[in-house]
Amino acid sequence: MTKLAPVLSAHWDEKDSFTLEGYKRHGGYTASAKALAMDPDAVIQLVKDSGLRGRGGAGFPTGMKWGFIPQGDNKDHYLVVNADESEPGTCKDTPLLMANPHVLIEGCIIACHAIRAKHAFIYIRGEVTHVVRRVNQAIEDAYAAGILGNGIDVVLHIGAGAYICGEETALLDSLEGFRGQPRLRPPFPAIAGLYARPTVVNNVESIASVPAIIKNGAEWYQSMGTEKSKGTTLYSLSGHVVNPGQFEAPLGITLREILDLAGGVRPGHKLKFWTPGGSSTPLFTDAHLDTPLDYEGVAAAGSMLGTKALQIFDETTCVVRAVLRWTEFYKHESCGKCTPCREGTWWLVQILRDLEAGKGTEADLAKLLDLCDNIMGRSFCALGDGATSPITSSIKYFRDEYIAHLTHGGCPFDPVASTLFAGAGA
Amino acid sequence: MAYSDEDFQIMDSIIKRYPRPRSAIMPLLHYVQSKAGYVTNEGIEVIAKVLQLEAAEVTAVSTFYTQYKPTPVGEYHVGVCTNTLCAVMGGDAIFASLKDHLGIGNDEVTADGKVSLEHIECNAACDYAPVVMANWEFYDNQTVESAKDLVDSMRAGNPKPPTRGPNKLVTWKEASAVLAGLNDGLAHEGVQAGEPTLLGLKLSKEGK
């Protein structure tokens, strides 16, 4: 019996999977027709009953989020889809939208109906020209077919290179035409979101999961996954593995099982460390191969499921180099609004650069941890928190490797050995 | 360059997408780049005029986002992912070799104006690492040699096509128009998915 369960990805292997015709061939837009005939509250209840939780990282129950939108308030409501996929390692929404943009549009129609919104915005990152084309064309085709425009409008908004806009309130500021900087909460977007109106912000995969739930029912979705983490999801495997790629499976599959399917770590090498859900989730090691990859299982083991971005690094990889690079990323992407994140990430980079070059001291490790302690939880959004994850977890598991840089007078690793072209099979 | 009546009509249609005009500032900045190749002072003034904002307000937004370029880039803007995973798997080596091969540094353009180079952050294609982008189209599974061949083909005026994208690489200005939300009619070209995207589906069909 297969461990995989393709639902979102079920028809991606058909050449025209991204077209309206290709989507309709497998019952596309029958779920939205069904939902539009239902009472909006019944749609929300069905999504609540399914157990669907947000696939953008936090895992908040989707139906509950929809239920927070005040009803009968005579205000415009908005749905905003977060397609600003930028968390390092995360690569699921981009191939989903390239292969099947219509499933997102159908999900938008259902969600808009449920929360009584007339407008949906899809905020997609700007660095994916062809994905923009596919989504834009799908929206045009949906209008031409009369699927959109009858009370529900979908607008594609294209970003311009800012990781922080994946944070939902920064995204809203960006969509309103400002610099993308996070807002203080409360008020939450459900009360004062886009244009200060009640707004649901959902990840692409969350909204794209809805049509199948409407079509097949809450019980069907509940039958997959684990006790509190229901349904199927896209696991994205990358790095030092024989066959990287997308694996759609019920929540709770383990890395060992996925690695078995992917042919394992590249030949002659062994797993050293990995991220369960992108670079903002604390690192795991080979001790976590059997950790169930659901929201509870990963949290219990000290990390977060995040975006299920499984980045695999073998023993040729220097963990200090890896962590420094991620830290440089957070420093670069910090929006600058909150001092602990803006200044803190800058200092983290300075110290890590010294450590990598063998110029630091062992006391710098304590200083790094102290800095992390002062960044964690002290800013408007979680970017700074995420920046501390690779540092604290790598010091926890690989303290000796940091020390080795000091005793060796620099990095003891050969960067060539970790490349795909020079290191394969070596 | 002067903005024509047609340009103003297009900008008006972009503004009309949104309930509030200011939301159009980002697509309008992409549109300015599609005309001038980068965000010119004139472009800032035009956006300020059509949105009834101060030029400083438009500049404040423009300078926040890395895709808006304050100076001209090449006809083909090449981004090499040097975030951790791509860097480790070869992105660092690719970036170093392209700098050497082209004789330019980060955020610089070749003298012929054909190619510019930038090290970029994670571009959501980690299962195709190491990744190179050109005008934000995907060039998957790159090596030092394939990346050099790519930029050589650009300088020869016949760029290699993207791995997952249209049949022919469009120019920076043409790509900027797509990012302004204008349809160039190329959505149907190229694959629907690459092999790694389909791996799980393929294995499940094999009963694994």
Image (spheres, rainbow, N blue to C red):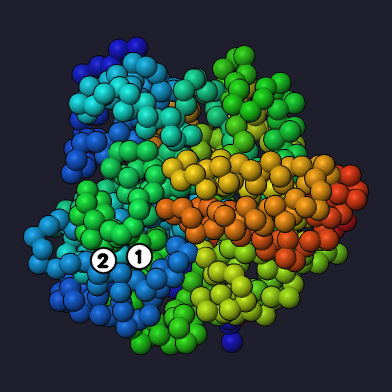
Residue A35 on image: x %, y %: 21, 73
Q: Residue at x 42, y 53 (%)?
A: A380
Q: Which residue is mark 2?
A: A111
Q: Residue at x 56, y 17 (%)?
A: B113
Residue B139 on image: x %, y %: 60, 42
**Closest to the observer: B106 or A241?**
B106
Q: Which residue is mark 1?
A: A207
Mark 1 touches mark 2? (CB < 8 Å): yes
Left or right: where A413 falls relative to A137: right
Amino acid type at circle 2 is Ala
Chain of the residue under the numbered disc 2 shown in the image: A
**Closest to the observer: A110 or A90?**
A90
The C terminus of chain B is located in which quarter? bottom right
Whole-Å distance between the Cαs marked 1 and 2?
Answer: 7 Å
Left or right: where A92 falls relative to B128: left
The N terminus of chain B is located in which quarter? top left
Q: Earlier in the sequence, mark 1 or mark 2?
A: 2
Please tell me the numbered disc located at residue A372.
none
Q: Is residue B150 above or below residue A100?
A: above
On whether disc 1 and disc 2 are found on a single subunit, the reply is yes
Is residue A94 something that shows in the picture? no
**Closest to the observer: A359 or A280?**
A359
Q: What is the number of callouts on the image? A: 2
Residue A52 on image: x %, y %: 38, 76
Mark 1 burial class by Cα count in 10 Å: few <14, some 14-19, many 20+:
many
SS assignment at label 2: helix
Q: Residue furthest top?
A: B1
Residue A426 on image: x %, y %: 88, 56
Q: Is residue B156 above or below residue A45?
A: above
SS assignment at label 1: helix
Mark 2 burial class by Cα count in 10 Å: few <14, some 14-19, many 20+:
many
